[in-house]
Image (cartoon, rainbow, N blue to C red):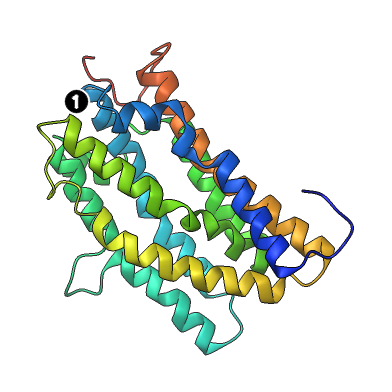
């Protein structure tokens, strides 16, 4: 939606949600194959390995964004996200839980942690996201996180589908996703309120819409790369994870 007029808060929120309805990676063929039980173990391993790089860089992205907030209240709010992913030294965070997922599908944790074998496109897409959050305006950086508005649906679909279709995957393997159902809603509520309060000109509103489109593209590009390398046409780049599919 491009317009020179200032959108009402309801219209801006609707435009943001329309982006998710059109562009969120719940619609990607690789996701459909993943939760539909159409992938073999090696293809699921490739997904878990590549997604780990994204998960591991999320607290890096969030720490960068946290430092940019001008008030202690805002920094404290965003710091919670870093703790959610990195843990607090006493309890495991999201990155640690994703490592448990990677181990649960048969990957070596040292190999995963080292980032060995991830696809070049995964690295490029994730690094571009970190750079976006570092370099763009604060409201654009916050808006790029609003894919979390849509994540509870994809989480529910992914978990139920994978448990139903892969007898070698357990609830413990997918434990990463359970706290995210609550965390994502809390995070997206705060980020949406922030965007509504700070996108106060037509130009800023168009910028936050573009930021959310960019983030959807980041997620979509990662699944594009997985599909191209491990499904069709099956062209695995040199140096990338190369199972016997």
Quick one: 85 or 166, which is closer to the camera? 166
Q: Relative to 33, is 17 above or below?
A: below
**Is residue 226 found left or right of 70 in the rendered image?**
left
**Is residue 151 found left or right of 134 in the rendered image?**
left
Quick one: 139 or 67, which is closer to the camera? 139
Q: Position of residue 45 (x, y in %)?
A: 24, 31
Q: Position of residue 18 (x, y in %)?
A: 63, 48
Residue shown at 30% from the left, 33% from the top? 35
Q: Give the residue at the far bottom of this rendering.
A: 72
The quadrant of the rendering that contains the C terminus is top left
Q: Hey, which quadrant is residue 16 in on the image?
A: bottom right
Report if residue 34 is visible in the image: yes
Report if residue 116 is visible in the image: no
Q: Position of residue 204 (x, y in %)?
A: 77, 64
Q: Relative to 176, is 141 above or below?
A: below
Q: Which residue is mark 1?
A: 41
Q: Give the residue at the far top of this rendering.
A: 233
Q: Name the secondary structure under disc 1.
A: helix
Residue shown at 28% from the left, 20% from the top? 242
**Is residue 144 found left or right of 157 in the rendered image?**
right
């Amino acid at each position: 939606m491009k317009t020179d007029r200032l959108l009402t808060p309801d219209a801006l929120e609707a435009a943001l949600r329309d982006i998710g309805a059109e562009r969120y990676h719940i619609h990607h063929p690789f996701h459909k194959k993943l939760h539909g039980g159409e992938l073999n173990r090696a293809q699921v391993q490739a997904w878990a390995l590549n997604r780990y790089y994204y998960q591991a860089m999320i607290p890096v992205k969030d720490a960068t964004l946290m430092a940019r907030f001008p008030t202690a209240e805002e920094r404290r709010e965003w710091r919670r996200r870093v703790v959610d992913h990195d843990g607090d030294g006493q309890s495991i965070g999201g990155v640690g839980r994703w490592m448990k997922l990677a181990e649960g599908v048969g990957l070596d944790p040292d190999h995963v942690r080292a980032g060995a074998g991830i696809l070049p496109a995964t690295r490029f897409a994730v690094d571009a996201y970190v750079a976006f959050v570092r370099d763009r305006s604060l409201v654009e950086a916050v808006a790029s996180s609003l894919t979390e508005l849509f994540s509870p649906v994809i989480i529910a679909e992914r978990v139920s589908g994978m448990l139903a279709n892969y007898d070698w995957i357990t609830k413990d393997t997918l434990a990463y996703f359970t706290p995210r159902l609550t965390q994502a809603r809390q995070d997206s509520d705060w980020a949406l309120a922030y965007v509504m309060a700070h996108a106060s000109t037509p130009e800023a509103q168009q910028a936050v819409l573009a930021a959310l489109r960019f983030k959807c593209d980041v997620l979509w590009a990662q699944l594009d790369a997985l599909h191209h390398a491990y499904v069709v046409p099956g062209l695995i780049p040199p140096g990338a994870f190369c199972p016997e599919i």
